[in-house]
Image (cartoon, rainbow, N blue to C red):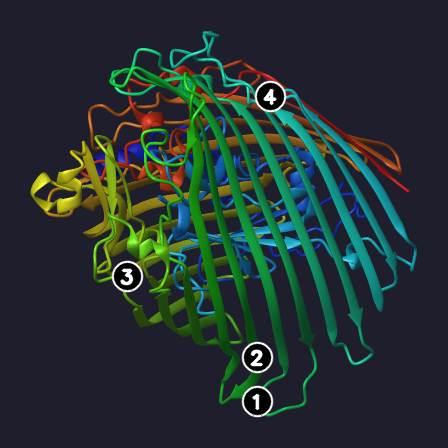
Amino acid sequence: MAKEYMMSILRFTPLAAVISVALAAPVWANDDAAPGVDNTTELPRVKVTALSSAIKIDVPGTVSVIDRQQMDRRLVLNIRDLVNYEPGVSAIGTAGRWGLDSFSIRGLDGNRVSIQTDGVTAANSFGFSTTGMRAGRNYVDLDTIKSVEIVRGPASALDSSDALGGTVRYVTKDPADYLRDSRNYVSLKEQYGSADRGLTTSLTVAGGDRANGIMIVATHRQSHELANQGDIRSTDYTRTRPDPLDARTDSVLAKYVHTATSGREDRFTADIFNNRVNTKVYSALNPKAPQVQLLDDHAEDTSKRMRVSFEQRYSKIDSALADRLDWNVYWQKTETESDTRTLASVPLRGKVYDRLYLSSLSERLFGGKLTLRKDAAIGAAEHRFAYGVEVSRTTPTGQLGGTGTDIATGITSSKTPYMPENYPLSFFPKNNTDRYAVFVQDEIGLLDDRLKIVPGMRFDRYSFKPDSGDRYFAGSFVQGGLNQVTHNRFSPKLGIDYAATDSVNVYANYAQGFRPPLYSELAVAWGTPRLYGIVPNPQLKPETSKGLELGVRGRGDFGYYSASVYYNRYRDFIFGGYALRPEQWPQWARDQNLLIVMQSVNFPKATVKGIEASAGLELGALTESLHGWRLQGSLSTERGDKTVYGSGVSTPLNSVDPGTAVLGIAYDTERWGAELIGKGVRRKNRLDAPELFRAPGYATLDMYAHWKPLSMLELSAGISNITDRRYWDWGGLHGGVLANVGSMNGSGIDDAQMRSAQIDRLSMPGRSFNFSARFTF
C-alpha cells in the first residue's frame, strides 16, 4: 500500500521535475524585491521571498499567503478563484441556488475549518438538503481583503483548537494601505466575468493621514447562474443546464485608524455584507413522483452579515509582564432567510397545494481576545512569549414556517395536509454557546536563532446551554436528555524549525485539536410523515485530533521551494447524517412510518495523510536574457479513511480531494505581464459507495495578463479553461454539511454525488473570459 501511494505521487512528473530543479539549485538569502516589480502598486505586498513565495518560511508548519496583487492579477471574485491553485486547499459548495459554502483543507471541510475576518470567526454552516433550510459561511466580499493566510491544521496555540482542518484568515484593507504623503485616495474598479455574466463595481475612498486615517470600500455585484457544460434545457429534473438565477451582492467596509504618538493604534471597523439570490428551481420539479409531485419551485434567499469591532494595539509597553499588547472586542450578526414557493400535487389526496416555506436562521456572536507578548533573554536562549485569553458567546435562532393553499377550495392553513408538517417548527432550541480559552506559547531561539523551538498550550472550555422553555421541547419528535453540555480540554502544540543553512530550513510540527459538537449536531430534530426524520444526540462526544508534519523549504535569488508530509488522526469523528437501523428508531419515527431516520454520531476514528510541495524558479537568476521570467508550480496528494460507527469497517473518507498538480510560467515587467497556468487533477477513485459519481480526471489551461498604460489606470484580463474542457470539480459535488445526509456507511451522500443525478448540471464552466479596469485618482 505504501509503495502504491508513493507511485501515485510520482506520476506528477512534469511538476516533480520543476521542483527537483528548484531543490537542486543553489540559493542565497535575499530580501530585496524581485526585478521588474512595480513598487507603486495599490497595496503593500507580502514579500516572503525574492519571487514573492506564497509560503511563509520562518514558521514550523505550512502557512501560505495570498496577497492583494495576486488576487487582482488573477481576477479573483470568489473563494473558488481564491484557492484554485493552492495545494491541499479547495472551495466547496454546489452549483445553483446555494452556491459556494466554505473551504476544504487537507481533506476536512465545513465547520472543521475556521474562517476568520480580522480575527472574528465566521458563523457555522448549517443545513440538510432534505429540509431546504441552509446557511453557509461565504459572507466575505474579497474586494475588501488585503491578504489571506491559510494555516494547515490547529497549528498555533493562539488560534482556536477546533480548526481541525486549518484556518483561513482574512485581513481587511487599512487606510494606511492607500495614504501616502498625506494625500487622499479614490479608486474605481469595474470587473466583468462571462461565466456568470457578472458585473462588479468597487469604490475605494481613503482620507486623512497616518495619524488619523479613514477608509470606505463599497462593492456592488450583479450576476446570474454559473455556466456549465450541460445542454438539456428542460423545465424539470432532467435539466442539465443551470437553473435560471439572478444574484445581487452589496458590501461596505468602513474603517477608522488612529495612531498615537506613543505608537498605540486604535481601530474601529464596520463591515456589512448582503447577498440576495432568486432562483427558478427547475431541477427540483418532478411531475411523475409517486408521493409529492413538484410542479413549480421558485426560491428567494437572502444572506446578511454585519460586524462591528474595536481593537487596540500597544507596541511599546514598559512592563515586566509584556512588551506588546493587543486586545479586541467584537459583535457580529449573520442571517439567512429563504422563501420557497412550490406548487405541489399530492396524488393520494387528489389535491394541489400552493405552498410557501419561510425559513430563517440567525447567529449572533459577541466576544473578545487579549494577547500579551514579551521578549526575554534567558541564558543563551531568546524567548518570545505570547499568552492571553479569549471569550465568546454564540446565540443561534431558527425556525421554519409557512402556509399552504388548496388550489381547488382556496383554503389556507399552516397545518397538515396543507403543509407537510404543522408549522411553524423549530429545528433546534434557543441556546447560548459559551467558549473560554487560555493560551500560552514560547518561541525559543537557540544557536543565534538558527534553531527555534515553539511549545504551546491552549485550554478550551465549551458550554452549550439550551433554553428549556423553548417550544422546541414540545415537538413530537424531540427526545429527552438534551440539557446543558460542557466539555473542556488542554491541547498541546510543539514546533521545531532549524535553519540548516542561510537558505534552507527543516521543520517539524505536532499539534492536537479539539472540536466540541455544535448545536446543529447535538440538537437538530425533525420529522416528515412517510419520508424522513432527524434525531438529536445529546451524548455526542467532542472530536479530537493529533497531527504531525515534517518539511523542508528554502529561498533565495533562484526562487523558493517547500515540501512537506503530514499525518493526522482523529478520534470520535462526528458524522452528521448517519442513517439509523430500524431497531434504533424512536417510537415517534415508527409511528410516522418514515423511510429513513438520521442522527449525528461519532465514528471511532479517521485519518488523513498526504504530501504537499510548491516551488518557484526565477529564470532571470540563471541568465540575464530570461530576466522577468519565472516558473511556479505545486502538487498535493492525500488519502483519507474512517472507521464506520457500529461496524468497525474502514472506508474511504470522501471529503478528501483528488491529487492535484499546478504548473505556471509568467513574465513581468514594470508596466505589464502575463501568466499561463496549467492544472491537472486525478480521477476521484476512492469513494466508499458504488452509487457515487467518480469525477474523471482533467486538465485545464488558464491565462492572465495585466497592463498599466497610465499611472492612474490598470487593466487586467483572463481566459479560464482555454481548451473548453468538460470537467467536474470535486468540491463542487458536495456542499459541506449538506454532504452528510442519509447513509449507513458514512459516505455523506447527497444528490450532487449520485450517479443517478443529472450530473452534467454540476459540471464546471467551459471557456470563459474576465476583464477588469481600475482607475485611481
Q: Can see residue 727?
A: no
Question: How far is mark 4 from mark 3, CA to CA?
Answer: 41 Å
Drawn side of residue 287 relative to residue 37, left or right: left
Mark 3 in CB contact with mark 2 (< 8 angstroms): no
Question: How far is mark 1 from mark 3, CA to CA?
Answer: 34 Å
Question: Considering only vertical position in the picture, is 374 above or below 311?
Answer: below
Q: Quadrant of residue 222?
A: top right
Q: Quadrant of residue 632?
A: top right
Residue at the image point whose x is 87% and y is 45% from the top: 186
Q: Secondary structure at mark 1?
A: loop
Question: Considering only vertical position in the picture, is 484 above or below 15?
Answer: below
Taking depth in this image into account, of 251 and 117 the one nearest to the observer is 251
Quarter of the image for the N terminus: give it. top left
- Residue named by callout 3: 542
Picture coordinates of residue 430, whole percent (x, y) = 41, 59
N-terminal of the pair, mark 1 or mark 3, is 1
The kind of residue tagged 2 is Leu
The kind of residue tagged 4 is Ala
- Residue named by callout 4: 195
